[in-house]
Image (cartoon, rainbow, N blue to C red):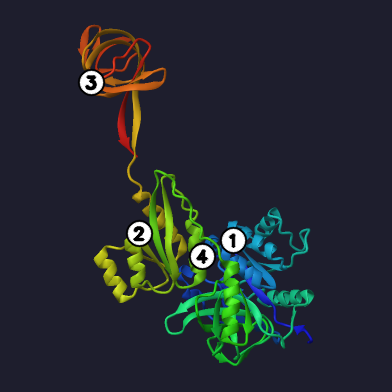
Amino acid sequence: MAREARPPVIAVMGHIDHGKSSLLDYIRKANIVAGEAGGITQHVAAYVAEHDGRFVTFLDTPGHEAFKALRKRGAAAADIAILVVAADEGVMPQTLDALAAIREAGVPYIVAITKIDKNNADIDRAKNSLIEHGIFIEGMGGDVAYTLVSSKTGEGIPELLDLVLLSADLAEITADPEASATGFVLESTQDPRRGASATLIVKEGTLTLAGFVVAGDAYAPIRFIEDFRGKRVERARPSEPVRISGFNKLPAAGSLFSIVKNKKEAEALAATNAKTLAGAPERAAAVEGTVELPLVIKADVAGSVDAIAHELKKIIHERAALRIVSSGVGSVSETDVKTAHAADGIIIAFNVSTDAIASELAERDAVSILSFSIIYELSDTLAKLLAERVPARAIEKELGRATVLRTFSSGAKKQVLGVRHVSGTFVVGNMLKILRQDTEIARGRIANLQQARADVKEIKTEGDFGVEIEARVDAAPGDELVTFVVIEA
């Protein structure tokens, strides 16, 4: 069967708030920024645009560091990447993460220097920051194509699309439209009306209204196909993003999909894939002396669940740990509340609502449901909650130290000693411990202090003094007396 050129699939990648969504917004003349909390893209989404009579599929991938896994999926599914760098900031940490994902996927890339219309834009500084980080652009010792763009005025965007199509031509991107459809699961979500649904990118063949789609260990009958605008279509050709609903379970984002003829074949292939995917779930061994904050995580899409788990791994406390006891896609349910209650944990709801019954049960059982729409606010809150769950720890703070010179008298509980001040302060009533060769042999308290044969309340100067202590073990010359106070930390 003859292969023919197919539209390129483009991943737009870069640091948070460097203008990726605004760039795509201008390209396809549709506002998506307003639909994202805080103006930050937090899902992978796919859109089709047209330039000079040719189609291009764009993947809008998140720039926040927590979505590294999604960025890697986006790059893996893409033929070409656009690395977005803002003219007012230059290369930033997530720029380098995006570049690493691009290089790992082995796809060619173009640099788009955005926000050139801003008053504080410094194009030369942005170019130099690229060179400093090993991104050698054309005209500055390298062969990476770049263009300057403004998503407000549209300046440079036609040139950027020209570069995209030129790169596609040089890469000779082709597909066999007559083959059985294969491709990637870009995203999956639990639709309240249609059940488990997934966004697919067709890379080979043509998807039609026949058979079953199998993605990893999930499968679905192809009853209808929706394009990226939500319009029902009869087929999807190579490079087109589509939505399929009715999966038996949520397919994992990033899974490869293929088509089989019937349910029996779908079940068999899914079962085979499940064996390959099987493995014991990761669970860090609990460290003695630490406490846990159990979490039930519910999010709008599977990619968000992965991203939250990635972000939570960075929250570290020496005496506490976060533990995900359950996670899934969809609204917070009665089962989620019961799970959290049994584990003495809390529920994290990311871009999802809570069922009425679940809300009532949570209130009755005093289960906290925390709702978020921006991931870094979620991580900041959980870091604080984890610290609050850690019980106070008693710490001994040393106040003073003295060396025992001689024993004057000793009784059942009290003894009078002659000692030499070494450091710190001694006060009547202080707790103390007796050390013999740096090993503690007893504890007690100071009953009285004498200096120059006069009773005093406190001693804090160098010299010899007398001390009456209450302790069950007699101190001997050469032992050390250490006074201390117990504080909570």
Residue type at the position of mark 4 = Asp
Structural distance between the alpha carbons of marks 1 and 2:
47 Å
Q: Is residue 30 left or right of residue 319?
A: right
User: Which picture quadrant has residue 158?
Assistant: bottom right
Q: Mark 1 points at which residue?
A: 88
* Marks 3 and 4, how far apart at CA: 59 Å
**Dot placed on the residue nearer the N-terminal end, 3 or 4:** 4
Q: Which residue is drawn at 66% across and 57% down?
A: 125
Tag on residue 428? 3
For the residues labelled 3 and 2, the Cα–Cα distance comes to 48 Å
Q: Position of residue 223 (x, y in %)?
A: 54, 90
Point out residue 61 in the picture as x, y percentages from the top left corner: 58, 70
Locate residue 343, reporting x and y percent. 35, 59
Residue pictured at 64% horizontal, 71% vertical: 11
- Do labels 3 and 1 touch, CB within 8 Å? no
Q: Are marks 1 and 4 in contact (CB under 8 Å)?
A: no
| Amino acid under disc 2 | Ala
Secondary structure of the residue carrying numbered label 4: helix
